[in-house]
Image (cartoon, rainbow, N blue to C red):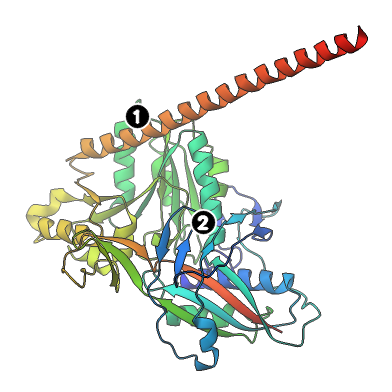
Amino acid sequence: MCMTCGCGHDEAHVEGAEHSHPHADGAAHSHAHGAADPGWHTHADGTTHRHAVVPAHAHEHHEHEHEHEHEHEHEHEHEHGHEHGHGHGGDLHFGHGPAGAAAPGMTQARMVRVERDILAVNDAIAQRNRGWLEERGVFALNLVSSPGSGKTTLLVRTIERLAGLLPVAVIEGDQQTTFDAERIRATGAPALQINTGKGCHLDAAMVETALHRLAPADDSVLMIENVGNLVCPAGFDLGEAHKVVVLSVTEGEDKPLKYPDMFHAAALMLLNKVDLLPHLSFDVERCVANARRVHPAIEIIEISATSGENMGDWLRWIERGAHAARERRLERGKALAQAGRLDVLERAARATDSGARERAAGG
Amino acid sequence: MHEMALAEGVREIVDETARSSGAGRVAAVRLEIGRLAQVEIEALRFAFDVVKRGSLADSARLEIVEVDGTAWCMCCCEPVVIAGHGEACPKCAHYQLQVTGGDRMRVLEIEIE
């Protein structure tokens, strides 16, 4: 059983990939307890917030444990140790089997504090992906939608329009087939297909493997087309700069309310296929209001990949992001070069000092 | 459907903690699930029952503490409790809300023997 997506063994494939198992062991975690207001938490990302009072529940015999008041700081420094590959097959499965041996046990029951995020493994790999992408100035977008919203056509048109301006690479996620990657490759852009098997979403480990295989160019745009699913991909960070949700006008204006988590997670909504509006009773204003109800700050572009309507807005949005990613890479390079120069100067100064001391000692 | 993936994540954390604590078996697993965490609790229970088999948590009971979703209402300028994304502020009925909590999932503690 796959650790990350719940699919069976050998079901998640990355095109051309060998077999590998990212293990979750070796995760380091520390936290401090202290008497404090109930439910205040400070997380590693710096956010501090208070959960509402823990609600009443049915486990009477453990009531005392549920009423814990604590303040803790998470430092999720998970080190994901060994990743090893086998030569056979093109399959990739993530995770490992159940624990083998039971250690000689304690006879008395005792509580062990854990306080770890269930998605900590995925999130740590996603952060690693984010670092990898930022180092290279790659602007990565995670495209999410229900099946049939027109993501792939939109991608093909986007790549065509960006040709000569910005290099684009694509990671395609689907349960089965390499059809989508083939459509992208037909445009001349590098593309890699991940088949998730029974899995309903891409996860960070799959994308990490694909990133190293695809090796997108510095200062390029990486489009990750997630599995068509408006539910599961919302919770899985891949290391992207933004999630972009594609909703087509053939789907119904209440989708943001039906699948609020996804619209809440996305920075941009592309309302696609607007060329079909004259033939439909789709209420654009209501759809926009619904999206803003779920996510007040969401950006929205009404677009048609087929007619090209407002494609310019979308392309400019991408270019702004790519430009910012490139600037960050250059600044980082400058900072590193500066640190390097300082290091050289410091070593030279130390060498001069020790030379002087030796001469003094010799004299 | 992603509850299966989450259950696998729970088992990983539980097994790792139990092993490093020298446990013979895990008697109970306690989770904290935010109401905004995109989790169907019953699906998670079902999935955990499946993935725990053969692990140290084979016979462990699963206890779930649900935590309310909280948000900062930009109209009221105060924190409020919400039932889900896209819900209005219970005080002013506006939607200018910034989620501040209840969107996480954690393994709180385990009881080992």
Give coordinates of residue A109: x percent, y percent.
69, 86
Number of numbered labels in the structure image: 2
Residue at point 51%, 88% (across, down): A63
| Residue bearing mark 1 | A163
Q: Is residue A112 left or right of residue A126?
A: right
Q: What residue lies at 65% left-to-right and 58% top-to-bottom?
A: A28
Question: Which numbered disc, 1 or 2, marks the residue that appears first in the sequence?
Answer: 2
Q: Nearer the viewer, residue A276 or A104?
A: A104
Q: Kindly give the residue lying farthest to the right in the view shown.
A: A362
Left or right of A136 in this view: A223: left
Residue A95 visible? The answer is yes
Q: Amino acid at mark 2?
A: Asp
On-image quarter of the N terminus of chain A: bottom right
Image location (x, y in percent) of residue A303: 20, 45
Q: Nearer the viewer, mark 1 or mark 2?
A: 2
Residue B81's place in the image compared with A140, above or below, is below
Graded by Cα atoms within 10 Å as few (under 14), some (14 to 19) or many (20 or more), the crowding at tag 2 reads: many
Q: Position of residue A223 (x, y in %)?
A: 40, 44
Question: Residue type at mark 1?
Answer: Ala
Where residue A259 sits: x, y (%)? 29, 66
A297 to the left or right of A353: left
| Host chain of mark 2 | A
Rendering quarter of residue A263:
bottom left
Chain of the residue that carries numbered disc 1 in the rendered image: A
- Residue of label 2: A123
**Residue A123 against residue B102 in the figure, above or below:** above
Number of other residues with Cα within 10 Å of mark 1, as a class: few under 14, some 14 to 19, many 20 or more: some
Q: Quadrant of residue B42?
A: bottom left
